[in-house]
Amino acid sequence: MQAILLEDVKGLGNAGTVVTVARGYMRNYLGPRRLAEAATPARIAEVQRTEEQRTASRVRKLAADREMVDLLGRTILTLKAKTGSDGRLFGSITAADVSEAIVAARGVRVDRRHITVDPPIRTTGTYVLRVDMGEAGIAEVKTIVSPLVDE
């Protein structure tokens, strides 16, 4: 008997997969627990359409993320911070600060959790920060930290 899995079943398959199972397994285990439903030609076609849409969406998102990696790779950020006379910052530049600077410079939002600031920026100078965009790759953003001049 063919069944369409509604949820991931360990040892059998992932949600949305069409699998062949014994009638008793379907009737006594998968069906009552709402883990699967009987596969009809219409439902199989619907599942295939849904999977094709999901794949197309994934491809579009990956292409957009790759464009973002390219854009961020060409970005040079300038951050101003209060400093002492020796060039050390009062505090440090955080991933949230870098995320806000990217929004100001390019108009795109990057989650601060994807930005790596290691070691912490505590002095003025030029730094290369890594922005992890998942499957699309890692962008290296050049960041210049300069002192904030009071007038």
Image (cartoon, helix red, strand yellow):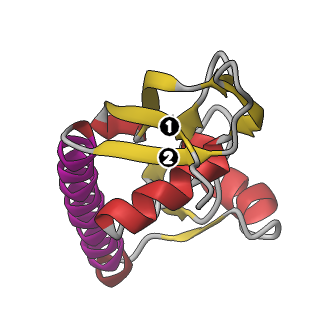
Q: Is the magenta stretch mostly helix, strand or loop?
A: helix
* Residue drawn at 50 percent across, 35 percent down: 145
| Labels 2 and 1: the sequence-earlier one | 2
Q: In this view, does 73 lie above or below 54?
A: above
Image location (x, y in percent) of residue 37:
58, 71
In the picture provided, is 7 more to the left or to the right than 32? Answer: left
Give the residue pinned by disc 2: 79
For marks 2 and 1, give the one nearer the viewer.
1
- Amino acid type of the residue that numbered disc 1 sits on in the rendered structure: Ser
Q: Give the range drawn in magenta.
A: 44-72
- Amino acid type of the residue that numbered disc 2 sits on in the rendered structure: Leu
Give the residue pinned by disc 1: 146
- SS at badge 2: strand
* Residue drawn at 50 percent across, 46 percent down: 79
In the picture provided, is 26 more to the left or to the right than 110? Answer: right
Which one is nearer the viewer's eye here, 85 or 36? 85
In the picture provided, is 99 more to the left or to the right than 57? Answer: right
